[in-house]
Amino acid sequence: MTAKELQSFFAQPYDRAAWLGNLRTVFPRTDLFAQPQSFSVGDSRAESVCQLGNTHLGNDR
């Protein structure tokens, strides 16, 4: 995915299905949870916060 494609993607309204597809494209070693893990919102700028999975980077990070 090019930088221009990513910029266009981030300019769109949030769509979880599209986000999940792009996560796997950009970070192929992503393990998605069966159900998103919700967190309490500590910042009034966000309506809700959830973790969709874990991404494994190089060097086992």
Image: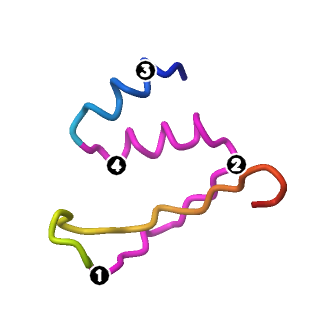
Any mark on residue 40, and which?
Answer: 1
Any mark on residue 5, and which?
Answer: 3
40 vs 44, left or right, is right
Give me the C-alpha separation between circle 4 and circle 1.
19 Å
Relative to 20, residue 25 above or below: above
Q: Amino acid at mark 2?
A: Arg
Residue 35, position in %: x, y? Answer: 44, 69
- Secondary structure at badge 3 equals helix
Give me the C-alpha separation between circle 1 and circle 2.
27 Å
38 vs 48, left or right, is right
Task: Of the two numbered discs 4 and 1 on the same chain, state the one appearing first in sequence.
Answer: 4
Q: Which residue is mark 2?
A: 29
46 vs 56, left or right, is left
The stretch in magenta equals: 14-40
Q: Amino acid at mark 3?
A: Glu
Tag 1 and tag 2, C-beta contact below 8 Å: no
Query: Is label 1 or label 2 in front?
Result: 1
Residue 59, position in %: x, y? Answer: 84, 55
Q: Amino acid at mark 1?
A: Ser
Quadrant for the C terminus in the image: bottom right
